[in-house]
Amino acid sequence: MTQRIRAFVRLGRASLAVLLLAGCGGPKPHPIVVGAVEDAAKGSDPAAPMALAKRAGFGAIALSAVWTPPLTAPADAELARLRGAVTAAAATGIRPIVAVYSFSGVTPLTAEARTQFASFAASIPRSLPQVRDVIVGNEPNLNLFWMPQFTAEGSDAAASAYLALLAETYDAIKAVDQNINVIGGALAARGSDKPGGKRPTHSPTRFIEDLGAAYRASGRSTPVLDMFAMHPYPESYSVPPTFAHPQSTSIGLADYDKLSKLLADAFGKAPPLGYGEYGIETAVSPAHAGAYTGSEPIDTVDAATQAEYYVEAMRLAACQPLVRMLLFFHVTDEARLEGLQSGVFYADDEPKPSQPDVARAAQDAANGKLKCLS
C-alpha cells in the first residue's frame, strides 16, 4: 500500500510538472516601443505633433533626413527643423529616431558618394546627441529608393551595394558613439524579383538572401547593423496583420518565423527586429472632411477596423521574441487624400474613434502587459 501511495504521489507530481510546463509554453509578451513616423514634427510648431503622439500612447517618433550629393551634413535649415523636433520629443519623453535615406536618382554607388552619405548620417547624432537611433536607408529593395536593383545579366545589384553603404555608415556612426542603435534594412514587404520588368524590385526574401551572400563574400567579421527593420504593410487595408505568407516571398507581421530564419541564415544570428512602418488607412468622417483636399484613390477601412488591426499588430509584435519596436505610419492624417490617412488623428488634429484603443494598447505594450494572440 505504501509503495502504491508513493507511486501515486510521484505520478501526481509528474503530472503537475507537465501541467506547469504546458502553462509556461507559447509566446510571452515583452515590452516594446510603439511609436510613429511623423515628419509633421519638423514643422514650425514641433511641440504640437509630439503632444498628439503622447496622447496616442506613442513612445517614439521617426523623422526623415534625406541625403543628396555632395552633402556631408544636413543643410542648416534642415538641421534646425530636426533640432526642433528632437528637442520637442525629448521634452515630451518621446524617443527620437532619424531615418537617413536617398531616392534612386542619387543612389550612393561610388566610394565618394558612400563616404558623403555616411558622414551625413553620422553628423546627425553628433549634432543632436538625443538621437540614439539612426535608420540607414529606406526600402532599398524598391526602385523608388535604390537603382539599379539588378545587373544587366539579372543578378543582384541592390543588396550588395546597400551592404557596402550600410557597413561604411555603421562604422561612421559608431565612431560618434558606440551605443547608438544603427538600424538597417527598412525593407518593403513585397517585390517582384523580375529584373526585366517595368518596375524592377526585390522581394524582401530575396533581398535578405542577397544581403547575406554579400556580407559573407565581403569577409567582414564585425556587424553592419544593430537592428533590422521591416515595413510590413498589407496588400490592402482590409487585410489583417495576422495574415501570413508561407508560400510567397512577401513578409508581413505574421511572418516572424520566416523573417528571423532568413536573417539567421544571412548573418549567422538573427538581430533584434523593428517594424519601422505599418499603417491602415481609414475613410474620413464627413464631420472632418473640410480638413482634407483631393480625392481618395484607394479603398480604405473604418476607424473601428483600424483600431482592431493596430491592436492586433501590437499584440503580435510584443510576443515575437526579437521584436523591439513597432512604428505606425503617422500620428495625424495627411491632409491630401492622395497621401496616407493612417494616423489616429484626423487632419484637423481631432482624434479618430480608434485613438483610445490604440493608446491603451500602446501603453500596455510599453509595459509588457499586452496579451498574445492565441
Image: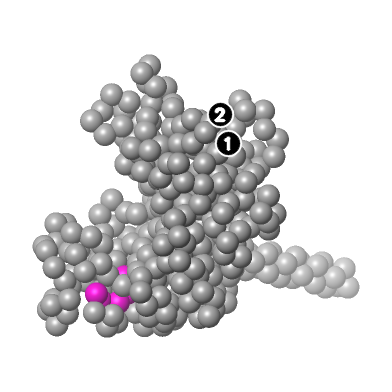
User: Dividing the picture into quarters, in which one does residue 180 lie?
Assistant: bottom right
Q: Distance between the residues labelled 2 and 1?
A: 7 Å
Q: Name the residue under label 2.
A: 213
Residue pointed to by mark 1: 266
Magenta segment: 343-347
Magenta stretch, main secondary structure, is loop
Q: Where is residue 64 in the image (x, y as percent from the top left)?
A: 42, 58
Look at 62% across and 28% down and name the residue there: 218
Residue 71: percent from the left, percent from the top?
Answer: 46, 46
Label 2 vs 1, first from the N-terminus = 2
Query: What crowding class fits label 2: few (fewer than 14 Cα within 10 Å), some (14-19), or many (20 or more)?
Result: some
Q: Which amino acid does label 1 sit on?
A: Ala
Residue drawn 21% across the image and 69% down it: 335
- Mark 1 element type: helix
- Could you tell me which secondary element the residue under label 2 belongs to? helix
Residue at 38% x, 16% y: name it: 153
In the image, 28 versus 311, the foreground residue is: 311
Q: Which colour scheme is used?
A: one colour
Do the CB atoms of the residues marked 2 and 1 lie less than 8 Å apart? yes
Which of 140 and 31 lies nearest the eye of the viewer? 140
